[in-house]
Image (spheres, rainbow, N blue to C red):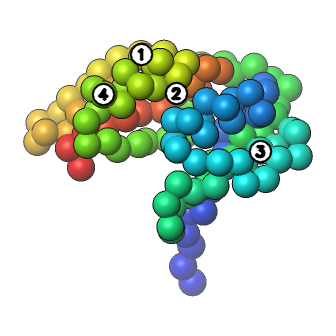
Amino acid sequence: MALNIVMVTIDCESPRKLAEFWTQALNTSVAFDVGEFVMLAANEEGGVALGLQQVAEPRAGKNRVHVDLNAADRHAEVRRLVALGATEVGEHEVPGGLAWTVLQDPEGNEFCVSSGH
């Protein structure tokens, strides 16, 4: 038996509004929208879809799960994402050349952009 990750879902206040940010960030489109749940298409063949699910509770504390993205030019991508509405939280680097930037989407959900993979 084998399992594959096909979608990661982010709890949020306004799925349609947050979809505006994530469709631009990931260069993808809305594949499914029923108001309280919006699914974005995977941005490449075999990729993972992103779900945005409306919840009543506000985000509290650090995300227990977050999305990690990779870019050839991390700094340029971070600038682009900030221009789209993300907030930069911090930068990290570990020996071996792996570096990443922690950001928050417009609703405060954390995600990372790395380089060096």
**Amino acid type at image mark 1:** Val
Classify 10 Å Cα crowding around label 4: few (below 14), some (14-19), many (20 and above). few
Residue 89 bears which disc, if any?
1
Q: Which residue is mark 3?
A: 38
Q: Earlier in the sequence, mark 1 or mark 3?
A: 3
Q: Which residue is depicted at the point 79% across and 27% down?
A: 14
Residues at badges 1 and 3 in contact (C-beta under 8 Å)?
Answer: no
Residue 67 bears which disc, if any?
none
Q: Nearer the viewer, residue 105 or 22?
A: 22
Q: Report how far apart the C-alphas of labels 4 and 2 lie in the structure.
A: 18 Å
Q: Which residue is depicted at the point 77% across and 33% down?
A: 16
SS class, disc 4: helix
Closest to the camera, between mark 2 and mark 3, is 3
Residues at badges 2 and 1 in contact (C-beta under 8 Å)?
Answer: yes
Residue ranking furthest to the left = 96
Classify 10 Å Cα crowding around label 2: few (below 14), some (14-19), many (20 and above). many
Q: Report how far apart the C-alphas of labels 1 and 4 lie in the structure.
A: 16 Å
Q: Which residue is depicted at the point 51% across and 35% down?
A: 25
Q: Report how far apart the C-alphas of labels 3 and 4 lie in the structure.
A: 28 Å
Residue 76 bears which disc, if any?
4
Q: Which residue is mark 2?
A: 110
